[in-house]
């Protein structure tokens, strides 16, 4: 009877953990944490909520974040199939080189997507200051890319915005390149009229079935030349899987799975940015083979660890 009771308890625990895991999103594109020494944070990534007037609470720091080599990526995959940058400075230099190669190829509109180090996060919100707080973090990082592309000091120190200041849509104009941070559909006409090579940085265009065709066409004209995103995926039985999506133009988009022992293994490449369904299918199929010999204990441990983050 004692053994039967223990089996029932184990079954109930497994069902509870599975329900929790299934309740989590099937996948999300959360950026890898960047942990500079001066900006260490233990908060996990989550969707920030913008509050009116929040940008006014954040002034430019007297000693801005500098993208030096001491600012390391929390997710390092140096021994695997995808070579990822080892610091924020390296990442922004890689992004600049991708933009330069895009220019050489004749691209007039480009986009980059870079993860931000969490600054001033709380237990409830990684970005209590909303978009304005993100801008204060991104601005000094972007200066490294501007330096590589030949921006002058005055151009790099610009503090110009499009639209409302609370939207923190910063714009930096160089001789032949214009960076726009956190652009959204409200400034679409301004973006369409830009004569310089246009580079969107972490844009806020989120397409759905109700999006205007003009917005869809504009985004289709913007080549994603640099991206670095962590992936949280699911295998059979809601088994949590970690991965990475990366691209540095002109290379294809690369998808790799993080390995428990360190490093990563390439799962596939795509000429165009893969959609969510493609990524889910790729990781699920890989997990069916790679994880088929996992013990019940290991599966429970992985599911329980993921469920505790919900």
Image (spheres, rainbow, N blue to C red):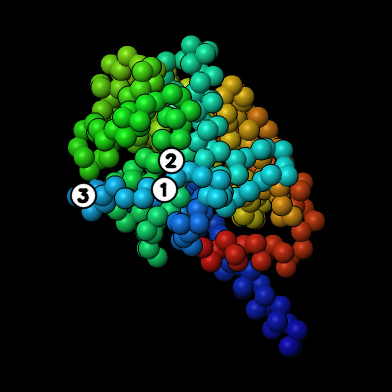
Please tell me which residue lies in front, 147 or 296: 147
Residue 217: which quarter of the image?
top left
**Pointers 2 and 1 in contact (C-beta within 8 Å):** yes
Provide the residue designation for mark 1. Answer: 65
x then y, percent, for residue 214:
32, 20
The residue at which mark 3 appears reads as: 56
How far across and down, in percent of the image, does residue 173 sit? 32, 24
Q: Please, is residue 186 above or below residue 107 in the view? A: below
Name the one closer to the observer, 182 or 266: 182
Vertical relation: 164 (above or below) 261: above
For mark 1, give the secondary structure.
loop
Placement of 221 over or under 93, stated as above or below = above
Residue drawn 25% across the image and 40% down it: 167
Residue matched to label 2? 141
Q: Earlier in the sequence, mark 2 or mark 3?
A: 3
Distance from Cα at disc 1 to Cα at disc 3: 19 Å
Local SS, label 3: helix
Whether residue 210 can be seen here = no
Q: Could you tell whether 251 is left or right of 180 in the image?
A: right
Count neighbours of disc 1 (C-alpha within 10 A) and say few if under 14, some if 14 to 19, many if 20 or more.
some
**Mark 1 or mark 2, which is nearer the start of the sequence?**
1
Q: Name the residue rendered at 44%, 45% in the picture.
A: 66
Mark 2 vs mark 1, CA separation in Å: 7 Å
């Amino acid at each position: 009877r004692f053994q039967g009771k223990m089996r029932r308890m184990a079954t109930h625990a497994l069902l509870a953990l599975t329900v929790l895991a299934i309740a989590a999103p099937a996948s999300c594109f959360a950026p890898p944490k960047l942990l500079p020494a001066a900006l260490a944070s233990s908060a996990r990534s989550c969707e920030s909520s913008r509050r009116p007037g929040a940008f006014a609470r954040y002034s430019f720091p007297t000693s801005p974040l500098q993208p030096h080599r001491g600012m390391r990526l929390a997710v390092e995959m140096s021994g695997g199939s995808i070579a990822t940058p080892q610091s924020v400075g390296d990442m922004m230099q890689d992004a600049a080189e991708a933009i330069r190669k895009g220019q050489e190829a004749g691209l007039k509109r480009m986009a980059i997507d870079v993860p931000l180090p969490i600054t001033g996060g709380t237990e409830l919100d990684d970005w209590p200051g909303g978009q304005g707080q993100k801008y204060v973090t991104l601005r000094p990082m972007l200066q490294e890319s501007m330096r590589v592309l030949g921006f002058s000091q005055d151009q790099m120190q610009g503090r110009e915005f499009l639209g409302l200041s609370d939207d923190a849509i910063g714009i930096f104009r160089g001789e032949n390149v214009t960076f726009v941070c956190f652009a959204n559909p409200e400034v679409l006409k301004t973006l369409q009229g830009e004569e310089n090579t246009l580079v969107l940085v972490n844009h806020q265009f989120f397409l759905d079935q109700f999006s205007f065709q003009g917005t869809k066409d504009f985004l289709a004209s913007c080549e994603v030349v640099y991206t670095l995103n962590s992936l949280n995926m699911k295998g059979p039985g809601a088994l949590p899987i970690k991965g990475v999506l990366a691209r540095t133009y002109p290379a294809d988009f690369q998808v790799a799975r993080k390995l428990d022992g360190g490093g990563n293994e390439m799962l596939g490449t795509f000429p165009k940015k893969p959609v969510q369904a493609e990524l889910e299918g790729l990781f699920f199929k890989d997990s069916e083979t790679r994880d088929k010999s996992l013990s019940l204990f290991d599966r429970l441990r992985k599911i329980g660890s993921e469920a505790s983050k919900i």
